[in-house]
Amino acid sequence: MKKIISVIIVVYGCSTTNYNKYKKDEGKKYFISKIDSINNYYLIYAETDDSIFKIVSEKNNVLKNCDVIKLENSYNLSLISYRESALKVFGKNTIPLTIQGFGVDENTVIKLEPEKGILDIHFTTNLEGLCLKK
């Protein structure tokens, strides 16, 4: 009987661990400190207490009923690293360029900024252009 209970506890523990591993990240609160653009992309600088993140979002037409992100406001965002992602971004493959930046299309290189602590660039599924998805 003790063996059966032990097996149930181990199986339950493993299944909980796997569930938590793949559970959707609900996001973290980021303070928007700067919004810039290059070619067809917005560059959004978002900060936490100890880090700065450079988020790339493709420009598009403003969606109806959309909340446009604003400077000096905080938003819950789920960031995805370009460096760690094997996904196609904006329907295109990203092109790593040594340690200087990433080519997101044939005309656009998003540069890293190591002097500011920006060693990666990110994208998020929470934004479409500057519109926060609901």
Image: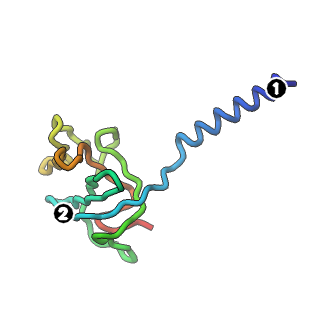
Distance between mark 2 and mark 1 Cα atoms: 60 Å
**Label 1: which secondary element:** helix
Type of amino acid at the residue the image marks with label 2? Asp
Marks 2 and 1 close (CB-CB < 8 Å)? no
- Amino acid bearing label 1: Ile
User: Label 2: how many residues lie within 10 Å, few (<14), some (14-19) or many (20+)?
Assistant: few
Residue located beneath label 2 in the image: 36
Q: Is residue 112 left or right of residue 32?
A: left
Q: Position of residue 40 (x, y in %)?
A: 18, 60
Position of residue 17 measured from the top left corner of the image (x, y, whole percent): 60, 37
Residue, x 28% and y 55% (percent of image)?
A: 55
Splitting the image into 4 quarters, where does residue 30 fall? bottom left
Q: Is residue 100 left or right of residue 50?
A: left
The label on residue 4 is 1
- Secondary structure of the residue carrying tag 2 is strand
**Residue 27 horizontal side relative to residue 60, left or right:** right
Residue 75 as seen in the image, left or right of residue 88: right
Q: Residue at x 26, y 60 (%)?
A: 44
Task: Residue at 31%, 57% (x, y): give it.
Answer: 47
Q: Is residue 123 above or below residue 13?
A: below
Quadrant of the frame with the N terminus: top right
Q: Is residue 21 above or below residue 105?
A: above
